Amino acid sequence: MKTTSIYAALSGALLLGAVTLVQAQTTAPAGSPIAHPVKNAEVALSKDYRSEHEAIESEYTAAKDKCKSLTGNAKDVCVSEAKADEKIKIAELKAKRKGTAESQYEVQVTRAKALYEVAKEKCEDLSGKDKSACKAQAKADEKKAIADAKATKKVAKS
């Protein structure tokens, strides 16, 4: 009889703990960029979201496969462009799921960083001062794009 009472008490405690966790998970923490966590979870688990994510991954694989025939820096640039495209599309998909100003900011920053990586790789074809100037311009463009994203984010918040 004691064993049954212990099992009953443990089961009750487990259920009480599970209910508490479910309630805690249905509300977003203060300051969270998530507008509606349950809705976002539904979108993240939806067939549309998963199929779009798989399509992005397959596009990346196809683009990367096209690069295999290239050699030298042309191949590196091709792979860099494929990676950049994938990163940007995934960021856009996540922003679509979240639907917040913060997520749009993240898309802009991801785009700026990805394009910087591509530009930096393209600079590798150059040499000397031209290469240095190319890399400096690429970095300046990245910084400007990130600053523009921050400005847009501030405007969206106010």
Image (tube, grey):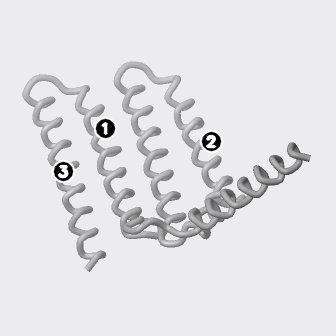
Instruction: Locate residue 118 relative to residue 129 in the image: left or right.
Output: right
Counting from the top left corner in percent of width and height, residue 140 is at: 15, 47
**Camera-side residue of 31 and 74:** 31
Residue type at mark 1 is: Glu
Instruction: Locate residue 33 relative to residue 49 in the image: left or right.
Output: left
Q: CA distance from mark 2 to mark 3?
A: 31 Å
- For this orientation, the residue located farthest to the left is 129
Q: Residue at x 20, y 42 (%)?
A: 138
Q: Residue at x 59, y 42 (%)?
A: 57
**Camera-side residue of 62 and 12:** 12
Position of residue 96 relative to residue 158, above or below, is above
Marking on residue 117: 1
**Lower position in the chain sequence, tag 3 or tag 1:** 1
Residue at label 3?
143
Q: Quadrant of residue 121?
A: top left
Residue type at mark 2 is: Ser
- For this orientation, the residue located farthest to the top is 72
Residue type at mark 3 is: Lys
- Secondary structure beneath label 3: helix
- Secondary structure beneath label 1: helix
Within 10 Å of disc 1 (Cα), the crowding (few <14, some 14-19, many 20+) is many
Within 10 Å of disc 3 (Cα), the crowding (few <14, some 14-19, many 20+) is some
Q: How many marks?
A: 3
- Secondary structure beneath label 2: helix
Marking on residue 2: none
Marking on residue 58: 2
Quadrant in the picture for the C terminus: bottom left
**Lower position in the chain sequence, tag 2 or tag 1:** 2
Q: CA distance from mark 2 to mark 1?
A: 21 Å
**Lower position in the chain sequence, tag 2 or tag 3:** 2
- For this orientation, the residue located farthest to the right is 1
